[in-house]
Image (cartoon, helix red, strand yellow):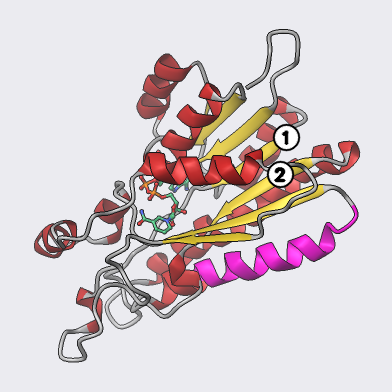
Amino acid sequence: MTDAATPKPVAVVTGASSGIGAATTRRLVDEGYQVHAVARRADRLAALAVATGCETHTLDVTDTDALVELASAIGPVDVLVNNAGLGRMDATLEKGTLSDITRTIDTNVTALMVATMVFLPSMTERRSGHIVNIGSMAGLYPLASATYGASKAAVNRFCTNLRLELRGTGIRVTEICPGRVATEFYDVAVTDPAKRERSKNSGVKEITSDELADTIFYALSVPAHVNINRIELQPTEQTYGGMNFDATVPADSDIA
Ligand SMILES: NC(=O)c1ccc[n+]([C@@H]2O[C@H](COP(=O)([O-])OP(=O)(O)OC[C@H]3O[C@@H](n4cnc5c(N)ncnc54)[C@H](OP(=O)(O)O)[C@@H]3O)[C@@H](O)[C@H]2O)c1
């Protein structure tokens, strides 16, 4: 927590209109941050602003010009949480479309890298800052979703290599790799309603967005000389590779 005399640390959270991003915004505001919440759905952001007092920016993170303008409008930031993302779990290469690939890579990879690039100068100038990237267990372990897994594997390598690029700058980089979290992610990821229902009723007790936000805040709250490189967390009843290892079940019915 900060006292009234100390300027509030500034955080930018992308994908703040629901799920992990909304919970992280709530948590960081509670912890005394001035939070800039970014997403496309203006109505959701407006409700979040009323509930928390965060500032809101309605934009598509795949719009590079909009990200450049955002960074210049906000000025120096202390924390960037690159959380905006999506998966198209039932869009296998066999059944998906080209836009499933481009949308996933543009959002999960390119936009995350661009956001990092545009907010980084204010951190390097002050030789402090913290970049938190939301990866996935799907980026570290096999899952029957090649495009999503590839996008999150890119996030994993981006984080490790960025750590090397930033050595000596005082800037921290953390990758958070969740397994299944109860959010709207699966409304986008699974288009077939029957499959979505099955996925939502798997019987596994999922991690909540608030628990994810606790994890992110833990990484932010350790002393500045400690860098939490990566945190992997899954529901206790979920194992690597989604929830299905039965080879007789088609891959695209797997549950992340
Ligand atoms: N839920 C899980 O089980 C799980 C597991 C591992 C990793 N993750 C990762 O966690 C992150 C957050 O997902 P979530 O689970 O919280 O799902 P969610 O509730 O669907 O949230 C996704 C957020 O990303 C935003 N977003 C998506 N595309 C965007 C774009 N082009 N521009 C701006 N914002 C965009 C959405 O906002 P708008 O639609 O309003 O733009 C929304 O706020 C994602 O990176 C996801 O890959 C989730």
The extreme bottom residue here reads: 247
Q: What amino acid is at disc 2?
A: His
In the shown orientation, is residue 137 left or right of residue 236?
right
- Residue found at x 56% / y 40%: 217
Residue 91, given in percent of the width and then of the height, sits at 30, 71
The magenta stretch spans residue 165: yes
The extreme left residue here reads: 194
**Residue 130: mark in rendering:** 2
The magenta stretch spans residue 230: no
Is residue 38 positioned above or below 62 on the image? Answer: above
Residue 219, given in percent of the width and then of the height, sits at 61, 46
Which corner quadrant holds the C terminus? bottom left
Disc 1 to disc 2: CB gap under 8 Å: yes
Residue 14, given in percent of the width and then of the height, sits at 53, 41
- Residue found at x 62% / y 38%: 66
In the shown orientation, is residue 180 left or right of residue 157?
left
> Mark 2 Cα within 10 Å, few/some/many (few <14, many 20+)?
many
What's drawn in magenta, residue-wise?
A: 151-168
Earlier along the polypeptide chain: callout 1 or callout 2? Answer: 1
Residue 55 visible in the shown view:
no
Residue 90, quarter of the rendered image:
bottom left
> Mark 1 Cα within 10 Å, few/some/many (few <14, many 20+)?
many
- Asked which secondary structure carries label 1, the reply is loop
Which corner quadrant holds the N terminus? top right
- Residue found at x 18% / y 62%: 199
**Residue 78: mark in rendering:** 1
Residue 43, given in percent of the width and then of the height, sits at 36, 25
Q: What amino acid is at disc 1?
A: Asp
**Residue 100: mark in rendering:** none
Residue 209 visible in the shown view:
yes
